[in-house]
Amino acid sequence: MLASGLLLVALLACLTVMVLLSVWRQRKIWGKLPPGPTPLPFLGNYLQLNTEQMYNSLMKISERYGPVFTIHLGPRPVVVLCGYDAVKEALVDQAEEFNGRGEQATFDWLFKGYGVVFSNGKCAKQLRCFWITTLQDFSVGKRSIEERIQEEAGFLVEAFRGTHGAIIDPTFFLSQAFCNVISTVVFGDCFDYEDKELLSLLHMMMDSLEFTATSTGQFYEMFYSVMKHLPGPQQQAFKELQGLEDFIAKKVEHNQRTLDPNSPPDFIDSFLIHMQQEQKNPNTEFYMKNLVLTTLNLFFAGTETVSTTLRYGFLLLMKHPDVEVKVHEEIDRVIGKNWQPKFEDQAKMPYAEAAIHESQRFGNLSPMGLAHRVTKDTKFWDFFLPKGTEVFPMLGSVHKYPKFFSKPRDFNPQHFLDEKGQFKKSDAFVPFSIGKRYCLGEGLARMELFLFLTTIMQNFRFKSPQSPQDIDVSPKHVGFATIPRNYTMSFLPR
């Protein structure tokens, strides 16, 4: 009894201190940030937000306070940017000032500022440059990345052919294929589709990402300072992230034993060699922690984001069979049925390219973007953002901007076609974000989406067990990420 009483007193004292710190912090910045709903001590604006629909909640608040406003996620103040003009001005026109990385509480539990995605300053810049250079080196090697994607797309076609038109869930087929592409780049090898370790890794990635999109994940985002010490679903997400880090660490240990400095076959070996070259540099960013967590960044993003995009794309094509028919017609006309699609075919296939872009726009997989942080005191519009202020660039609001997309809530490839049926780019197409912290995998992802989709559709037509009008394309969860609903389908040979 005494122990439990002391624990309760300690917990109340801890909460009291956090409330007082929250009040002090809010008063310190009061009047400097853009307007927004009045926060409560420690709770912030929690009572005014629907954590089941965080993106929609924030967009509703913007209707009252405008495209730039402040929201308090618990004790954490965040400036929210809505619409093309605000997002573009911050991330492009004032790119240097908005170049910092903000918090993502679930992933920060593991990354803690290390790795290419969640780091800041010199570290982020050097790791980004190294990845870009390494990927370019691999692209001009004996076996290009395009050839690796084509090969994996062929394996995926054979896997689908092996289902003999049965009704299946395509989720893990797609995840396995995209995982193998990024694995050949970062590890130098790939997995068998029946590999139990691969299936375990895919579950870890999918479950931890899905947690960030749930109501509990958004609640954790607000009150992580307390919740990280309590039991709950967040502890399972931590366990899965730790399992992924442990897997990467074992891969790095293996590469250390087999390293050939004269012929690095993958990203890990290239990084290890660079670590050796930087041994005498006391300020180097090339050390083991950054190697493991950068590799995890690449492995995670290179698997889940692209496979989820294509999974959403399949669902949208079954919902809109007229679009599927037009893509099939273009594939037959430009590529034919006997030639393997190449990335250069993209320039001659405006409708397929438009359908892919529209799937990314409509799917809106990163609705709130990754949080940014201003790196110095910054004037933005008529407001003052003190150094360190966190910023949410609402990429989903850009994708639904009526100025660029005539029917923003509809799936319509015409959004990316001109009057002559030719593909047209849109400045408001930002699935990979924009500015200095754009997604490093953009080029690779664009190639993968085109080659996988055209190769699969060259061989199959899609069939849902439901009629098109009954297919639900609304997302399962929308939070840090958009998670599409689970569904089943058949791959019928053409």
Image (spheres, rainbow, N blue to C red):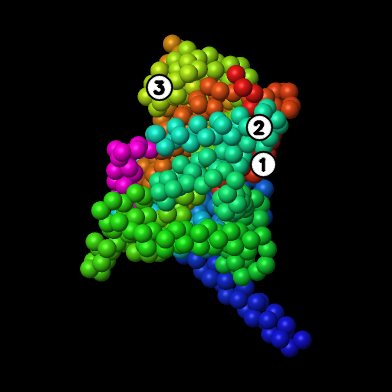
Which residue is disc 3 drawn over?
A: 345
User: Which residue: 59% across, 34% down?
Assistant: 159
Residue 132 magenta-drawn?
yes
Q: Nearer the viewer, mark 3 or mark 2?
A: 2
Q: Can you say which quadrant of the picture contains the N terminus? A: bottom right
Q: Which of marks 1 and 3 is in front?
A: 3
Q: Which of 298 and 386 is in front in this view?
A: 298
The local secondary structure at tag 3 comes to helix
SS label for mark 2? loop
Over which residues does the magenta segment extend? 127-145
Tell me where residue 114 appears, x and y as whole percent. 41, 61
State the residue at coordinates (36%, 59%). Answer: 258
Q: Marks 3 and 2, Cα distance to the nearest angstrom?
A: 28 Å
Which of the 4 image quarters holds residue 226?
bottom right
Q: How far apart are marks 1 and 3 (CA)?
A: 34 Å
Q: For mark 1, what is the residue? A: 476
Q: What element carries label 1?
A: loop
Q: Which amino acid does label 3 sit on?
A: Asp
Whether residue 67 appears in this view of the structure is no
Q: How far apart are marks 1 and 2 (CA)?
A: 26 Å
Amino acid bearing label 2: Thr
Quadrant of res 290:
bottom left
Q: Residue furthest right?
A: 1
- Residue highlighted by disc 2: 163
Most common SS among magenta residues: helix
Badge 1 crowding class, 10 Å Cα cut-off, few under 14, some 14 to 19, many 20 or more, is some
Q: Which of marks 1 and 2 is in front?
A: 2
Of callouts 1 and 2, the N-terminal one: 2
